[in-house]
Image (tube, rainbow, N blue to C red):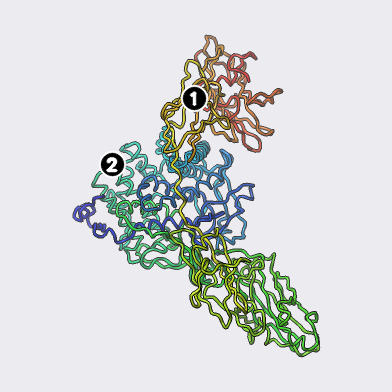
Amino acid sequence: MRKYLSLVLILSLIGSVLINVPKKAEAADYNYGEALQKAIMFYEFQRSGKLPENKRDNWRGDSGLEDGADVGLDLTGGWYDAGDHVKFNLPMAYSQAMLAWAVYEAEDALERSGQLGYLLDAIKWVSDYLIKCHPSANVFYYQVGDGNLDHSWWGPAEVMQMKRPSYKVDLSSPGSTVVAEAAAALASAAVVFADRDPSYAATCIRHAKELYNFAEVTKSDSGYTAANGFYTSHSGFYDELSWAGVWLYLATGDETYLDKAEQYVAYWGTEPQTDIISYKWAHCWDDVHYGACLLLAKITNKQVYKDAIERHLDYWSVGYNGERINYTPKGLAYLDTWGALRYATTTAFLASVYADWEGCSSEKANIYNAFAKQQIDYALGSSGRSFVVGFGVNPPKRPHHRTAHSSWADSMNTPNYHRHVLIGALVGGPGSDDSYTDDVSNYVNNEVACDYNAGFVGALAKMYEDYGGTPIPNLTAFEEITNDEFFVMAGINAQGQNFIEIKALLHNQSGWPARVGDKLSFRYFIDLTEVIEAGYGVNDITISTNYNSGAKVTGPHPWNVAENIYYIDVDFTGTKIYPGGQSAYRKEVQFRIAAPMNTNFWNNDNDYSFKDIKGVSSGNTVKTVYIPVYDDGVLVFGQEPGSGSGENNSTISITNATFDKNPENQKDIQVVMTLNGNTFNGIKYGNTQLRAGTDYTVSGNTVTILKSYLASFDTGTVRLTFDFSGGIDPVLTITIVDTTPEEPEQPNASISPTSAEFDKNPEASRDIKVTVDPNGNTLLAIKNGNTVLVQDRDYSINGNEVTIFKEYLATLATGRVTLTFDFDAGVDPVLTVNIIDSTQVETGNIKLEMYSGNTSDIINGIMPRYRITNTGTTPIRLSDVKIRYYYTIDGEKSQNFWCDWSTVGSNNVTGTFVKMAEPKEGADYYLETGFTEEAGYLQPNQSIEVQNRFSKSDWSDYNQSNDYSFSTNSSYGSNNKVTVYLSGVLVGGIEP
């Protein structure tokens, strides 16, 4: 339990500035459990791509399904950034990393709250997407969508029609900031999934390492241009390199990354005209050095980091060196006009994390905890109103968010309310005087964004950890449909003694979810009794159009010939009608129905579809249920005429309902019938008659559809037809959803270690011993790819210890080998073995050592690094030395060579590509490195270095994992598969 300074001590620390310290009795003023669950749910409404069947709402649908198609990739998924629909990967990756940090710091609290699974789903939704955005080692797609084009349209994501270009960075056009942030995100995902899904965590680590190397090698943002003006990084990339380095260290335990993280601290921003690390801004998508600093303090316990983070937190709370951040009159620490609450709540998270660390003094911890609670309480309502949509007293109702507003007219003003509740969204916040206007056009104070909620979630998890709360059981966002989604508005365009001309507009104002209709149609029903009685027939009636925006108008078609009922079919199939603007959400047609010329028997009054439009003319129209609308032939609005003249239609009290298969949420559906003189005959699903008493019950005019029947359906849409003795049979459309939490998976087995090295040198080879924790599972086998190892020949088992025999390992080729421990359930753990061979090979008077500048399997640039030493007693002319690196080209292309750096000067190093006449295993090409005369001599005991790089001309990938000369060394070491020649004579290495 946290302790707090007394009010007297707080006042003594801050002088005349008051921080309102909460008393324990006031701790329950806000339901932190509910706030936490809703803040996490917000991310479900930001999802792009194909949505899962178990989604917890009925107003979001699939969207952005063509993302990446312009570059031949699947870049679907991820989150829309804010109230718009661009996928900006810099703030998205930052937000995902922050959510992972919340899990890292407060996993137990999240587990107790029941929200951990939802938060992990949110993290993986983005990490899956970031992996898609990284198709090769040095290519990263950092944005989908054009910000200016996207912002010029106001409508729901599901019906976007604008082009959504994909933007990338690569070696020639780099973007170190966004690439390093993606590395941090994937490394943080690996941390939280390490024990839950080791295989997935390993995938995240592989991509994170490649991205980090890409960012570090290029150290430039020159190619990151599409986001300029939206998410330009003013802090540069060194803070991201530290941030990502810390997360890679936490994910891998490799201190190389910790060293790198600390190395880049020297490049962080400083306060003007000082060498003091910047402390007056906030941890955010642009500047992550604050979070990196806090984690470095916890990891290293170094005073420099402790001083830096405390300086920052002091400035935000009690002040530092006589200066303090501005506060609003009601207590919000106010940094900036845009997203003030985002900065305050994120700093609250950092304050809570640091205060809980044993390295923080109790005095500081009390101050920081008080500050954190004050800021979170402000967001939740301490100023008199909540700033979280769907939470607390007087919450925002009109956030600047296109899909939640759900306009059909490309207008913030239509409708004048939000059709959906964006549960859990933290808005930007008030002005510096606590003023706030809840208006959809107020994008400064009322916009929402993924990064706004990112630190907020972590802070709420810490609040729940300390104060508890009660999440709402089985929270969902299923909404009642509040307006007709499809309908026709019609009026009389013109009429005469033998004709009528109808003006009709077919509307699509769908929002649960919004959807494009390209198979919509409507029917105009007419009664031709007077035509028949006058001695004419249906073929004497002509149909013509005056104005038509995409419909095929045909008819009259028979409906009830005995009663002379026919209809005109107005079919817009092939024409997109969608809630996306004035010309998009409605399509007009003007059609004329005419009897023969010089006749005067035409009568509109007996026409079924004329009922509501009689007297509506002069360009006016009215909505009418008597012109029914169809989607791909299925009635979606209105009423059809009954089977006989004079018959009344029976009705049902609801025509749409939702049923949740989750056993905790299952409820019967009750429907009240209005018989209108008809008899109820039963209910049909298609041609199948429901069983009274088993599938439904009837009590008076109330029908109850039993949950036991509804639970038998899969998720989707079910249409039940109520069968009456006369009139049109009404249809109840039921959306079947399933919010049942996934069954907990069988706990995964684990192994330790998960990586090892084996040296094929007989003098250094050793068995590899692995400790197995089955966690209730049974080990079935150990596999190398599809090959099953043989127990007692290749390995042995003694209790929970598995020994991989050196005799087996010695048969494997050098490089990385993955051995899968195959269990009967759960995720199979993997042992990665790096096979090396330090066996000394006669090298004459030349010693060659090498490593690879990038050890990723898939890469578009191979980077052999050499160190050459003269071990003899006489000088060696370097122009007589040749080095051959053997590899497979993986797709015949011209290739380019660069020497990035050499002791003798890069201009004095040559590279020649040679295609082998007889390809060998792991080699169909080699790069021969040589030296010019100007390189001079290599003196006895002298060493030189050469750093080479080569790529295909089209930058397509190599797979270097199976290349003969490839080495996983990360520093100089022996590699006898790179050959050295002196005056044409092999003096080192083994040719393939």
Residue 691 sits above or below residue 797 on the image: below
> Residue 469 placed where, x, y %?
33, 57
Identify the secondary structure beneath mark 2. Answer: loop
Identity, as a three-letter code, of the amino acid under mark 2: Glu
> Residue 211 placed where, x, y %?
51, 39
| Nearest the eye: 33 or 714 | 714
- Residue count near mark 1 (Cα–Cα under 10 Å), binned few <14, some 14–19, many ≥20: many
- Residue count near mark 2 (Cα–Cα under 10 Å), binned few <14, some 14–19, many ≥20: few
| Nearest the eye: 925 or 285 | 925
Residue 860 sits above or below residue 167 on the image: above
Identity, as a three-letter code, of the amino acid under mark 1: Tyr
Name the mark nearer the viewer: 2 or 1: 1
Query: CB atoms at circles 2 and 1 under 8 Å apart?
Result: no
Please tell me in which quadrant of the rendered image residue 656 appears. bottom right
Residue drawn at 69 percent across, 26 percent down: 915
> Residue 384 placed where, x, y %?
33, 66
Please name the residue that numbered disc 2 is placed on: 358
Would residue 630 be seen by someone viewing this image from the given angle?
A: yes
- Spatial separation of the CA atoms under disc 2 and disc 1: 44 Å
Q: Is residue 721 left or right of residue 827?
A: right
| Nearest the eye: 232 or 634 | 634
Q: Single out the residue that lies furthest toward the left.
A: 8
> Residue 770 placed where, x, y %?
44, 28
| Nearest the eye: 803 or 447 | 803
Identify the secondary structure beneath mark 1. Answer: strand
Please name the residue that numbered disc 1 is placed on: 795
